[in-house]
Image (cartoon, rainbow, N blue to C red):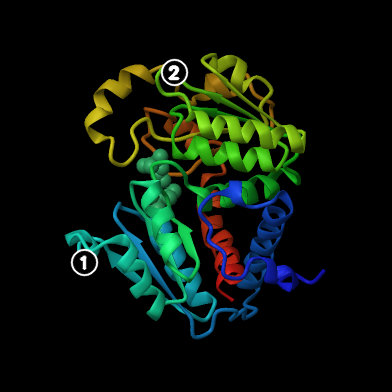
Amino acid sequence: MELMEMNKSFQGRDFLSLYDYTPEEIHYLIDLAIDLKYKQKKGIPHPYLAGKTLGMIFQKSSTRTRVSFEVGMYQLGGMALFLSSNDLQIGRGEPVKDTARVLSRYLDGIMIRTFSHDEVLELAQYADIPVINGLTDLLHPCQVLADLMTIKEHKGQLAGLKLAYVGDGNNMAHSLMYGGAKMGMDVVIASPAGYVPDETVTRQSTAVATETGGSISITGNIEEAVKDADVIYTDVWASMGQEEEAAERKKAFAAYQVNNELLKMAKSDVIVLHCLPAHRGEEITDEVIEGPHSVVFDEAENRLHAQKAIMALLMA
Ligand code: CP
Ligand code: NVA
């Protein structure tokens, strides 16, 4: 089937969590992202969103998300508006449900990065245009779509691969659990006590994995997690909004570092991913990020292509 033909099933939907999409739909998004990457590199125009506008609400900092969404809209023939919550009336207390209905009268889609996942759910409930989750404290689904695309490009497949995530049971861990389970991967999360993933995400992703032939496991044993892994993933020990806990977290996560010693326990062709920004010398060493197993800059690039696929399908 020609890519873009399946787009009717995506039109007008929100992209809040990979849990809301079927394995077939996620495969389709990845394949469209790969197609759009090819078109962009070959200079083949693909103005699927000509004349459309995306509003981008940011309550937290961003390099990749902001730039890739803005550039992506431009490449699709549309435009993007950067809306800092410092400037929006939402920052002065205007209700989310009013903001949602007002913005729906001007825009064709909203991307939001904020703290509370419930706030994004409320925005999506009241908006009658697609809402895309650009990161909450709970989830980061756009990042994981780009991660799955990157793994597929490097490994040629997703199902049956072992992905070991080393570190905090945070938004990245949660979205990797949902995305990995949907793709039939074996996802192992190695986190210290007190920092394990959310119970609902664990229960739901485990149920999904049962259907797809994948698996979800959570352990405190880092060596067991990375043994024979095809993919190793890590993220910062203290996420945005947790700056005050940084010292305490440094102690709790001291052993949870992706370094060359740890890589030796994985498969010899293991690839290493990190959503970035990275704290070299904490969750990952400089030699691993700069080393032959690292695909972190392909991964960062793929944010652009993966999000173009999301926007093209939802906002067309
Ligand atoms: N990985 C990621 O979302 O990066 P930014 O915080 O720079 O957007
Ligand atoms: N867990 C990190 C991801 C940043 C892209 C954070 O939320 O800060």
Q: Residue furthest right?
A: 1
Residue indicated by mark 2:
192
Q: Amino acid at mark 1?
A: Gln
Residue indicated by mark 1:
89
| Nearer-N-terminus badge (2/1) | 1
Residue 312 x %, y %: 59, 71
Q: Nearer the viewer, residue 143 or 136?
A: 136
Asked which secondary structure carries label 1, the reply is helix
Above/below status of 7 relative to 219:
below
Identify the image quadrant of residue 206.
top right
Q: Name the residue located 29 percent from the left edge and 55 percent from the top edge.
A: 59
Q: Nearer the viewer, residue 138 or 309?
A: 138
Q: Name the residue located 27 percent from the left edge and 28 percent from the top edge.
A: 246
Total number of numbered labels? 2
Q: Residue furthest left?
A: 92
Is residue 289 left or right of 84 when viewed as pictured? right
Residue 190 appears in view: yes
Contact (Cβ within 8 Å) of mark 2 with mark 1: no
Kindly report which numbered mark, 2 or 1, lies closer to the viewer in this rendering.
1
Cα separation between marks 2 and 1: 40 Å
Residue 67 x %, y %: 41, 63
Assess disc 2: are there few (<14), some (14-19) or many (≥20) residues with their C-alpha within 10 Å of its C-alpha. Answer: many
Residue 272 x %, y %: 57, 36
Is residue 38 left or right of 315 when viewed as pictured? right
Q: Amino acid at mark 2?
A: Pro
Is residue 84 left or right of 122 when viewed as pictured? left
Asked which secondary structure carries label 2, the reply is loop
Above/below status of 313 relative to 120:
below
Q: Quadrant of the N terminus?
A: bottom right
